[in-house]
Amino acid sequence: QVQLVESGGGLVQSGGSLRLTCKAPRTITSVFNPSTMGWYRQAPGQSREMVASITRSGTTTYADSVKGRFTISRDNSRKTVYLDMTRLKVDDTAVYYCHRDSPQVGIAWGQGTQVTVSG
């Protein structure tokens, strides 16, 4: 069963912006709300890396490479997490994955959404 569904990827020019959305339609609220949610990415030939995460209390963490450009947020009422990406660079090109770390039921991944930044 697909637990997390990403959307919003696409092709954008360098310097542009995109918003990624991750929805958890099959996750009950009592599981979603305490979960730490995050975004990871994987570029061709590279390891998957953490981009941003947000805890149940709203504490955020960012990779150094995206600080000041990306913003993660969550809407618990919609069981949704967002990643607002601005001033995109060619190096941001990757498949972006939504990630859930639940204290009750563990880890889940989305299927990924492609982000391509052209120079």
Image (cartoon, grey):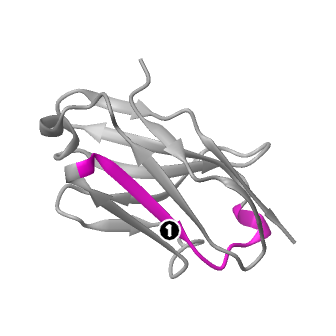
Give the labeled residue for mark 1. Answer: 84
Q: Is residue 63 visible?
A: no
Can you give x and y, in whole percent of width and height, for residue 4 in the image? 42, 35
Instruction: Look at the image and give the residue range highlighted in magenta.
Output: 78-92
Inspect the magenta stretch and tell me whether residue 91 lies in it: yes
Q: Is residue 1 left or right of residue 35?
A: right
State which quadrant residue 116 falls in.
bottom right
Can you give x and y, in whole percent of width and height, for residue 103 in the image? 19, 36
Residue at 60% over, 50% down = 41
Label 1 Cα crowd, 10 Å radius (few <14 / some 14-19 / many 20+): some
Q: Is residue 15 left or right of residue 58?
A: right
Q: In the depicted view, which residue is nearer to us: 108 or 18? A: 18
> How many numbered discs, if any?
1
Can you give x and y, in whole percent of width and height, for residue 56 in the image? 19, 55
Q: Is residue 105 visible?
A: yes
The C terminus lies in quadrant: bottom right
Q: In the depicted view, which residue is nearer to us: 105 or 9? A: 9
Outermost right residue: 119
Inspect the magenta stretch and tell me whether residue 77 lies in it: no
Query: As displayed, is residue 112 above or below residue 51?
Result: above
Give the residue type that dot 1 points to: Asp
Residue at 64% over, 52% down = 9
Residue at 51% over, 43% down = 6
Secondary element under disc 1, as helix, strand or loop, is strand
Outermost top residue: 1
Residue at 18% over, 46% down = 33
Query: As displayed, is residue 17 above or below residue 83?
Result: below
The N terminus lies in quadrant: top left
State which quadrant residue 17 falls in.
bottom right
